[in-house]
Image (cartoon, rainbow, N blue to C red):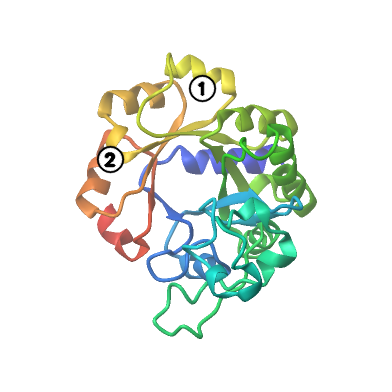
Amino acid sequence: MIEYCMKFLELLNQTGLIAAHRGARSIAPENTLIALKKSLGKCDFIEIDVQLSRDGAAIVMHDDTLERTTNVTEIERFKSRKPYRVCDFTLEELRALDYGSWFYKDKNHKEPLLTLRGSLEFIKENNIFLNIEIKDMSGVLGDDVAVEAVVKEIKESDAQELVLLSSFRHEYLKLAKEKLPDVPTAALVEGKHPHRLIKYLMELGASGYTLNDELVDKQTVMMLREAGFFVGVYTVNDSARAKELFSMGVNCIFSDSLEKRGSFL
């Protein structure tokens, strides 16, 4: 297991890597199985977002609420459930929703819920790496509950060697490292860097650092790379900017526009 995990880290320490941000979301509904399928051959690894249902199931969904990417407002029995928080719906209720028609011109084109288990089965079948972003659920659940649900799915799927865990809630990364010491982790940030960044990442036990495009600069990238951390930048859809970031030494960019991959390098 450790050897395979190190292969993932070896990949992440290369440059010019493209991560499929929520799957191939420019051509398919984000965070769905079809988005994962369409990203194959167009990226080096796939990124998804994971949070928990009311009954503790790990499901793939970016937003805290369901309106943007499902038909929840169109279902009569759910119309009294505003603000439609994901954490207020059971797995069975979430399975009743459509996750595709919002994206397509043909409103009859529907997509089912994607679970973390389904995502892990997909990457094992297709031998591709997966970055699991654990969404911040601290206002709803205890940290250990949130992390344990994700860890359980990874262990039961025997997918430890294929995943990278990341989160904006860095407490999750510490807990994940205790439970899955061989799985690499990355601290997600936006807006500003943590104080004494290198020391901070070392204390987290993180393997990498993923920051928003507006925050990145060459000096920080060099400092991180020299300290042995891989660097990811989100969300990058412009070819000129992608080339600029890679010239700084950034290892990977997270992109919605996988069709531009050839022009990114």
Check the picture and name the quadrant holding the N terminus.
Answer: top right
> Above or below — where is 43 with respect to 142?
below
In this rendered view, identify the residue nearer to me: 157 or 190: 190
- For label 2, the crowd category at 10 Å Cα-Cα, with few meaning under 14, some 14 to 19 and many 20 or more, is many
> Above or below — where is 13 with respect to 227?
below
User: Where, by quadrant of the figure, is residue 190 drawn?
Assistant: top left
Q: Circles 1 and 2: CB distance less than 8 Å?
A: no
Where does the image place residue 87, in percent across and percent down from the top left? Answer: 65, 51
Kindly give the residue lying farthest to the front in the view shown: 80
**Would you name the residue on which mark 2 appears?**
245
Residue at left offset 60%, top offset 50%: 50
- Mark on residue 212? none
Residue at left offset 48%, top offset 41%: 12
**Would you name the residue on which mark 1 appears?**
201
In this rendered view, identify the residue nearer to me: 84 or 191: 84
User: Where, by quadrant of the figure, is residue 264 drawn?
Assistant: bottom left
Where does the image place residue 18, in percent across and percent down from the top left? Answer: 40, 52
Where does the image place residue 24, in percent across and percent down from the top left? Answer: 44, 64
Where does the image place residue 52, in percent across and percent down from the top left? Answer: 67, 50
Q: Earlier in the sequence, mark 1 or mark 2?
A: 1
Secondary element type, mark 1: helix
User: Where, by quadrant of the figure, is residue 251 drawn?
Assistant: top left
**Could you tell me the amino acid type at mark 1?**
Leu
Q: Could you tell whether 195 is left or right of 50 in the image?
A: left
**Could you tell me the amino acid type at mark 2?**
Leu
Residue at left offset 55%, top offset 33%: 169
Secondary element type, mark 2: helix
Which numbered disc, 1 or 2, marks the residue closer to the eye?
A: 1
Kindly give the residue lying farthest to the left in the view shown: 240
